[in-house]
Image: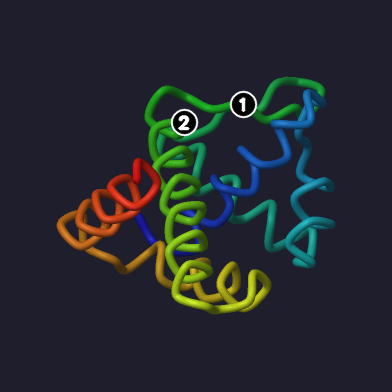
Amino acid sequence: MQESGEMYLETILILGKSGNAVRAVDISDKMNISKASVSRALSRLKNEDCIVVDDKGHISFTEKGRIIAEKIYERHQLITEFLVKLGVDYQTASADACKMEHVISDKTFKAMQSLLLNQNNK
């Protein structure tokens, strides 16, 4: 999956944490992207069997979509925490994590995760 698709899935996950139904307009507002661009992206995500949209425009995940969204979200959270522990301010760390979460290998991510876990258990 392309980085942009992962970003949309992560945004849907974050918006859904509020407990409200997620709609295309919510994604457009959150990501500051045109409604037309969001519509095209959602169409691709439907074709990739990552989301479903009901007749009211409410977006929900398929199992495949939820797995991808949660993986990207977890990476974002952990990379942000890792960078903050290195002394990077939170805002910069979060912005950098947003870029890194899409390209970091599973091996490197697991090493970062292990290091943070060991530090947090001390």
Q: Residue at x 73, y 62 (%)?
A: 31
Q: Where residue 42 sits: x, y (%)? A: 60, 46
Q: Amino acid at mark 2?
A: Arg
Disc 2 to disc 1, C-alpha distance: 9 Å
Q: Residue furthest front?
A: 122
Q: Secondary structure at mark 1?
A: strand
Q: Is residue 104 left or right of residue 84?
A: left
Q: Secondary structure at mark 2?
A: helix
Front one among 99 and 66: 99
Mark 1 surroundings within 10 Å by alpha-carbon count, few (fewer than 14), some (14 through 19), many (20 or more): many
Q: Is residue 69 left or right of residue 15?
A: left
For mark 1, what is the residue?
A: 60
Q: Where residue 49 sits: x, y (%)? A: 42, 32
Q: Where residue 28 sits: x, y (%)? A: 78, 56
Front one among 86 and 90: 86
Q: Residue furthest left?
A: 107
Image quarter where the N terminus lies is bottom left
Location of residue 57 (image quadrant): top right
Q: Is residue 60 above or below residue 70?
A: above
For mark 2, what is the residue?
A: 66
Front one among 34 and 100: 100
Q: Residue at x 20, y 57 (%)?
A: 111
